[in-house]
Amino acid sequence: MTPAARLQAAIEILDQVLAGEPAEKALTSWGRRSRFAGSKDRAAVRDHVFDAVRCLRSHAALGGAGSGRGLILGALREAGQDPDEVFTGLGHAPAPLTDSERDLPSAPSGAEALDIPEWLWPDFRASLGAEAAAAALALRSRAPVHLRVNGARGTVDQAVNALAAEGITAEPHPASSTALEVTDGARKLRNSKPYQDGFVELQDAASQAVTDRLPLTDGMKVLDYCAGGGGKSLAMAARASIRSFAHDADPRRMKDLPERAARAGAEVTLLPTGDLARSGPFDLVLCDVPCSGSGSWRRAPEGKWRLTAKGLADLQRIQGEILRKAAGLVTPDGALAYATCSMLDDENSAQVQRFIEESPDWHLADQNGWQVQNGTDGFYVAVLTRAKGGC
């Protein structure tokens, strides 16, 4: 495929995304229909699509329309490329520009230029203060590829060397002692021996840093209450010799966890909801709760545009319910950890404060946050313990 043909394919896929089709599904369908497209073509089209979705507001403004064609036109203008070099109509290239498309729109400004929904910008700015613009700009770019080194398989230096032997360049990341950032060869990772042998796992450096803050010691009984794919379950099991349990409201999210655990040399027991009370109490319960995902919008940019004020309020209600339920599963001397991949105060420190006000026998022992402009996803974690005299 020519570069122009790749952009036309991206235009067609983006029209489906704008109509409500999930980007991954639209890309998969296009790939099945387009057997002529090689691996480099597929990768390039994918990058065009996700770059456009990350920058949906600003590219639509620069392109003069909220359509796939408008988004690609806006992307070219932002990059300083002459659209007439691409929009030629030759072969499989996009059709030539119309007279209205040639009229240069006003440059985007404010939340539009930063690609944050207008309704969310006040809360986003209040949560991040002077760093709000930097965080929003970081969300417009592709996320780095981070790995967690499994200490049960070897050291960080050994992992770097093993990856290098597979043509993958990685270097330590300062957010966590187990974290690596892949700087070259990321697309070779899933077929590499270190990945297939469980020496390394895909996991953002801040997600690893979250588990670094947890009070884990050998012999503890630990529950990952909202386990999802189980990345934090595996990270905790790698940090200490623990009895590890995982639960999720939707057990289908954990379907790959047994295989991942076996690959990593870890034991994780999956618990359906009905077994939680019988299997508890636990010395540590981690609640990595459903959230806006604002800290990971580089990886899942559609979430930025599909989130609504009502949806955010519903998420906060669910977060509070999870905290209250999980608190009842903790031993008297145990710890309750609350985590999100959000940078919004209402989901983070304010949510924890509301819980403490409702449950005065708990107090805040530790909290920390990470922001996207500092080289990781945005994350937050708080560790709660019972106050002296609490039950």
Image (tube, rainbow, N blue to C red):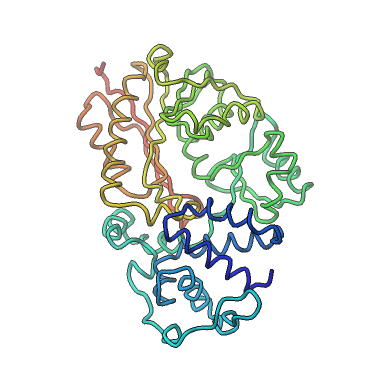
Q: Which of 118 and 370 is in front in this view?
A: 118
Quarter of the picture holding the C terminus: top left
Q: Nearer the viewer, residue 205 or 77?
A: 77
Q: Which residue is drawn at 62% across and 68% down?
A: 6
Q: Which of 342 and 177 is in front in this view?
A: 342
* Occupied quadrant, residue 152: top right
* Occupied quadrant, residue 105: bottom left
* Occupied quadrant, residue 241: top right
Q: Is residue 390 left or right of residue 301?
A: left
Q: In this view, does 15 lie to the left or right of 125?
A: right
Q: Which residue is drawn at 63% across and 74% down?
A: 92
How many marks do you count on the picture? 0
Quarter of the picture holding the N terminus: bottom right
Residue most toward the front? 33
Residue 297, how many percent across, how many down? 44, 53
Q: Residue at x 33, y 16 (%)?
A: 332
Residue most toward the right? 165
Please say if 147 is above or below 248.
below
Please say if 159 is above or below 387.
below
Residue 63, how many percent across, how many down? 44, 76
Please say if 64 is above or below 208.
below
Residue 126, how many percent across, how many down? 27, 56
Residue 202, how many percent across, how many down? 60, 42
